[in-house]
Structure formats: structure tokens, C-alpha cells
Amino acid sequence: MNSLGFDQVYQYVHDNLDHFHTARLESLRNLDMRRLTQKNPYLYCARNVWSANDIIKDMMGACLAGNEEEILGRFLGELAIFVCAQTMGGHKSTTAGLDLEFVGVDGVYYIVAIKSGPNWGNSSQKARLVNSFRLATRRLHEWQPGRLVQPTLGICYGKTRTSRMKQGYLKVAGQNFWSLISGSRTLYTEIVGLVGYQATQKSDANNAYAQERVHLENKLTAEFLSQYCLASGAIDWEKLVEASSPNYDLDKVLDLQMP
């Protein structure tokens, strides 16, 4: 195992965090009323929200937060591959559904799927991951008979304890994951310091994003008032629900007669 130089990680974060800001701004620019009105209208009605601007801000926040987490998740996954390449000679996996392969300090060949956080995937996605582990393990055993292979789910943040799952893979999260691929128990906190520092250096990008977000919020609020509010200014909940859920085709499928 090679030691990881702090300067190497610093340079990687410096060179690649721009992609996060670019993708984040693009995600904002792709946001429109059609996407916003796919959010659950019953939730806002149940919360008795009266303000069009409050609804737009909440819908925008929900859409953008999910997009930003996905974008940053990709960044962290690529950072993990970079770190492991420096320390363990790791490389990007060629198996669909997996991200990283390396030989650990224990001599075990690790095949890793990297996820940004602990709450990922539905049952079908998890079943596909197990199948990817099986395919990669079989390939490696054909290539190197007798090689000890450890399928691993690596999660970039979270306090989930390390465990061996009944499907045969190892689950490591947070500090344990970064320690496994780098040999450093402190890397997970050093990374957030680097990301935070670089974020403060991107004042122009942050200001441009904040300005565009406010402008879009104003534009979408005006559209919402025009399309989903009554002449009195009250929200037209029925029309808002109709924007998110119209799909009636039961009469074609079940031969029903309904008003």
C-alpha cells in the first residue's frame, strides 16, 4: 500500500469540483413548471399552504436537492476511485453495476459498488447489484482460480456499522469505507475540509447560481399564479392535482363505465 499525499487529494478536489458547480447550474436551468408540478400536490394541500411562492420554493428545493445529491455522489465516487488508485493501485471496474476493483492490504481482491449514502435503491436495484457481484466473482475465479474475492458495497457517508450481508457481500460506510480504500482513518474528515475550502473559493459560481435561482423562483411563481390560482388569488388545488395525475384509461383496460 502506498501512502496518500494530502496534496494529491487537494489537487483532485480543486480540479474536479468545478464539474459539480457546472452540473448544479445546468440542473437549475432545466427546471420548469412541468417538472415542479410532478411533486405531490396533496402534501401541500394537507399542510394548508396558501402562498404560491412558498409552494414554488418548496418544490424547487425538493427537485434541486435530489439533483445535487446525485451530482455530488458521482463526484465522491470518482474521488474514491482516484484515492484507491493512489494507495492500493485500484482501478475502475469493467463489470456493469460495479465501480472499483483493488487488492487490499490483506491480499483480498475487492470488487466494489460505490453509493453516496445509505438510503439508495429499491429491491430490484439491490437484486441487480447482487447479480453484478456474482458475475464479477465468477469472472475473477475463471481468471485467477483460488483468488479470494470480496464483493463490497461502499457507502461514502453514514454511520452504518460494517456487516457481512446474507447475500455474501461486505457493507462498509463512512469512515470505514474511506479507511478501507486508503488506509487512513482520518481521510473522511479531511475530504470534507477540502470540499468546504474549495466551495469558499468558488464565490463567483455560487453568486451566479444564487442569482439565477432567485430569478427562476420569481418566474415560476408568476407562472404558478397564472396557471394554478383562482381570480381571488387562492390556489386551485383541483387544477394542480389535474396537472400531476391525469392518466385515466381504466375504461380501456377494465371495460368500466365511470363518469
Image: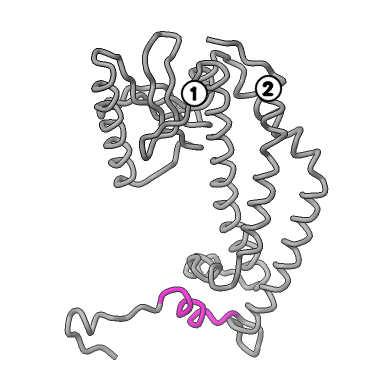
Label 2 – label 1 distance at C-alpha = 19 Å
Q: Residue at (54%, 65%) from the top-left corner?
A: 47
Which residue is nearer to you in this view: 62 or 121? 121
Dominant SS in magenta = helix
Classed neighbour count for the residue bearing mark 1: other residues with Cα under 10 Å, few (<14), some (14–19), many (≥20) = many
Q: Secondary structure at mark 1?
A: helix
Q: Is residue 62 left or right of residue 5?
A: left
Left or right of 157, for residue 214: right
Q: Residue at x 65, y 88 (%)?
A: 232
Mark 2 surroundings: few (<14), some (14-19) or many (≥20) residues within 10 A: few
Residue extent of the magenta highlight: 235-245
In this view, the residue farthest toward the front is: 143
The residue labelled by disc 2 is: 8
**Magenta span has 240?**
yes
Q: What x and y, as percent, mark residue 152?
A: 38, 26
Compared across the picture, whether 241 is left or right of 204 comes to: left
Q: Amino acid at mark 1?
A: Phe
